[in-house]
Amino acid sequence: MLRYEHGGDVYGTADAALDFSVNVNPLGMPDGVKHALISHAAEYARYPDPKCRVLCAALADRHGLMPEQVLCGNGAADLIFRIAACFRPKRALVPAPAFSEYERAVTAFGGIMQEHLLSEANGFALTEEFLKDITPETGLVFLCTPNNPTGRLIDPDLIRNIADACRKNGAILVLDECFIGFTEGKSMAQELGNYPNLIILSAFTKLYAMAGLRLGYLLAGDAALLARIAAFGAPWSVSGPAQAAGRAALAERGWEERTRRLIAAERGYLQKTLPAYGVDAFPSDANFLLLKCAAPLYAPLRARGVLVRDCSNFTGLDTRFIRVGVQTHENNQALVRAVSEVLNG
C-alpha cells in the first residue's frame, strides 16, 4: 500500500501554533545562508548552472571526492525518483517502517517494494537478519541511517555487510544519510571507493533548515553511475538560490557541533520527561523521537495547536505511534505540557 503522507502540512493546518511533525533544525537557517540568498539576488535573473559545478566542487572537497562523484538535485525526493527511474528494479528492499518515498518511487516505475519488518521489541534496530532478504532478485536496497521514523543509526559494520551482499547479488545500495549530521555517526562516504554499487543520499533540507529551497545530492565512487542517474533529471533542477544557499551552508563553521549539542540535550529531556506521563520514547540517535502511547495523541494535540507526525501510515505502526522533531527547550516544554493535558486533564 502506498503511503504518501508526510509531516509539515502547516498549509492545511493553519491553526497549528507549534509544528513538531517535521525534523528541521530548531536553530533555523544559518545567518550566512540567509545573507547569501540576498547577496546573490542579482544572479537569479539568469538560468542557474545546470551542472552545479561550484557547488559540486565544494561538496566533493567536503567529502574527499572528485566533483564528478557528486550529483545535485531538487531535494532528496527528486533524487530518489531519479534513481528509481534509472534502474527500474523489478524488486527493491527496504527496512520497515521507513520513509515512504522509497516505495512510492519504486512502484511509480513498475517495481515492487519488499519490506523487512523491524522489531519493536528491540527498539526497531536493524540486524543481520536483513541480509537474508537480499537475493539475486533484489535490484535496489534502500537504507536510512539514522532511520526515519525510528531515529536509529545502523551499525557501520552491518552497512558494509549489506553492501557486500548487494554487490554479490548485483544490487545497488542507496544509503540515505539526510539526518547523519544531527548524530554522532559518521558518513560512509570514505567507503565509496570500496563499494562501486553504493550510492549515498544526503540533503541540506534538515540540518540547515532549507526545506523550502529544495537541495539534495548523491555521492558515488562510480562517476559513470551518477551520470546515468543525472540523465533522468529535468534541466535546471537546482535553482540559483538553492545553489547559493548550499555553497554558503558548506562554508559555515561549527554549525553541526552546535546543532548536535542542542539536539542531544533536548532529546534527552524529552526521553526523560515523557515516560512520566505514560508515553514511551524509543531509543533515538537523531533529532526526532518515535513515541508510543496507549491513548492516541495526534488528534487531541492538534486540537491544542500542536502538530505531530501521525505514524499510523507507516508499515508496522498504528495510531498509538507519533513522531516528534526535537525543538528548542521552550517548545519542548510546551509539548510536554500539551501531552500532560491530553493524558491527565
Image (cartoon, rainbow, N blue to C red):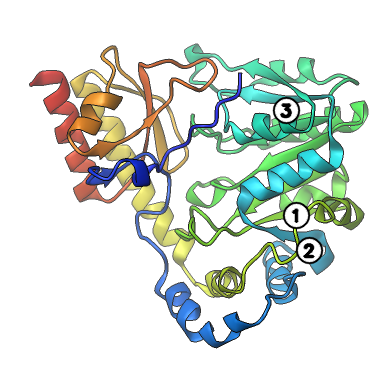
Q: Residue at x 67, y 66 (%)?
A: 62
x and y percentages locating residue 100 in the rendered image: 58, 31
Q: Looking at the image, which is closer to me, 279 or 75?
A: 75
Q: Which mark is residue 201?
A: none
Q: Considering only vertical position in the picture, is 15 above or below 283?
A: below
> Are dots 1 and 2 in contact, CB under 8 Å?
yes
Between the residue at mark 1 and the residue at mark 3, the CA separation in whole angstroms equals: 24 Å
In the rendered image, residue 44, in percent from the top left (x then y), is placed at 58, 80
Q: Earlier in the sequence, mark 1 or mark 3?
A: 3
Q: Nearer the viewer, mark 1 or mark 2?
A: 1
SS at mark 1 in the image: strand
- Report the residue at 19% width, 31% height from top: 303
Q: Which quarter of the image is occupied by the N terminus?
A: top right
Question: Where 32 sits versus 28, above or below?
Answer: below
Q: Which amino acid, mark 1?
A: Leu
Image disc number at residue 219: 1
Q: Is residue 155 left or right of residue 263?
A: right
- Type of the residue with mark 2: Leu
Q: What is the count of numbered marks?
A: 3
Residue at the disc numbered 2: 65
Which of the two labelled residues, at mark 1 and mark 2, occupies the earlier sequence position?
2
